[in-house]
């Protein structure tokens, strides 16, 4: 009788191990490239998604949209791309890097001028950047950082681009610009409203004038080299769900239905 019981327990153990092995085989990693300004919201959204989809592990690559685009074009492992501007997504679409029909506009944002929370520089408008007491202005690098491209559009529309360029220091992404303002290494910086909202070390002193730049639209699409098409589609659908919408709006993004 004891021998039968031992054999039964061993069979249960072996069966359990087999189930775990099968579960491990079914687990997959989803590589998501996302604009740096999406960092906080996307981390929270992925946590919510993984609770309902434990077999999928989301691995993020956050950075400037231009750098992420280049990484994708150079063969970097990416299943999904969330850009902070249309330009980078347009380039990938033209090169045939996207799966047809998967591109969607997800979010909209605003551009704001920020200063350290303790600043006494009396900055209240973008035009104030030409003042003599303003010596260092943090901007995103315009060649590959969308917030830098939007910033130049604004400064050009206000006819102060050349004057501000002499004071500009360029960050590799919007979070670096935010960090420089937080630490007081610069007098001010231009970022997205959502980045300013996550920091208590900066304050918004001006919002970009209406029609001074292109709308800040965040598109997303599935990359055609994905090895996890079903998971990519599922996560992209989740990002468009009411649950994700609530999270995005908590971080200040305007959701595009």
Image (cartoon, rainbow, N blue to C red):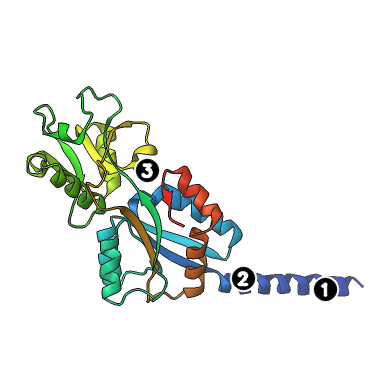
Badge 3 element = helix
Q: What is the residue that sits farthest to the right in this orientation?
A: 1
**Residue pictured at 55% horizontal, 53% vertical:** 243
Mark closest to the chain's N terminus, 2 or 3: 2
Q: Mark 3 touching mark 1, by CB under 8 A?
A: no
The answer to whether residue 148 is left or right of residue 133 is right
* 169 versus 1 height, above or below: above
Location of residue 14 by image quarter? bottom right
Q: Residues under labels 2 and 1: Cα distance?
A: 23 Å
Q: Element type at marker 2?
A: helix
Which quarter of the image is occupied by the N terminus?
A: bottom right
Depth check: 206 or 227 in front?
Answer: 206
Q: Which residue corresponds to mark 3? A: 194
Which residue was labeled with disc 2? 23
Mark 3: few, some, or many residues within 10 Å (few <14, many ≥20)? many
Q: CA distance from mark 3 to mark 1?
A: 59 Å
Disc 1: which residue: 8
Tell me whether the residue at label 2 lies in contact with that at label 1, contact meaning CB atoms closer than 8 angstroms.
no
Precedes in sequence: disc 3 or disc 1: 1
Q: Marks 2 and 3, how far apart in space?
A: 38 Å
Quarter of the view holding residue 3: bottom right
Q: Residue furthest top?
A: 120
* Disc number lying in front (2 or 3): 3
| Above-or-below relation of 200 to 209 | above
Q: Position of residue 122 (x, y in %)?
A: 20, 24
- Rendering coords of residue 184 (x, y %): 23, 31
């Amino acid at each position: 009788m004891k021998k039968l019981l031992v054999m039964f327990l061993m069979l249960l153990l072996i069966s359990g191990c087999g189930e775990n092995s099968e579960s491990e085989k079914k687990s997959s990693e989803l590589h998501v490239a996302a604009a740096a300004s999406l960092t906080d919201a996307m981390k929270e959204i992925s946590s919510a998604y993984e609770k309902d989809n434990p077999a999928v592990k989301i691995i993020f690559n956050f950075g400037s949209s231009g750098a992420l685009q280049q990484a994708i074009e150079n063969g970097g492992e990416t299943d999904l791309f969330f850009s902070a501007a249309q330009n980078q997504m347009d380039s990938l679409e033209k090169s045939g890097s996207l799966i047809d029909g998967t591109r969607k506009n997800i979010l909209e944002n605003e551009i704001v001028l920020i200063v350290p929370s303790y600043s006494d520089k009396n900055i209240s408008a973008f035009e104030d950047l030409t003042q003599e007491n303003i010596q260092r202005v943090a901007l995103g690098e315009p060649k590959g950082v969308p917030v830098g491209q939007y910033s130049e559009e604004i400064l050009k529309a206000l006819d102060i681009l050349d004057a501000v360029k002499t004071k500009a220091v360029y960050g590799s992404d919007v979070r670096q610009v935010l960090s420089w303002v937080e630490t007081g290494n610069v007098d001010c910086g231009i970022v997205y409203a959502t980045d300013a909202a996550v920091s208590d070390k900066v304050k918004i002193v001006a919002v970009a004038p209406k029609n001074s730049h292109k709308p800040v639209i965040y598109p997303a699409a599935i990359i055609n080299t994905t090895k996890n098409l079903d998971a990519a589609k599922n996560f992209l659908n989740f990002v468009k769900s009411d649950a994700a919408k609530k999270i995005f709006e908590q971080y200040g993004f305007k959701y595009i239905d």
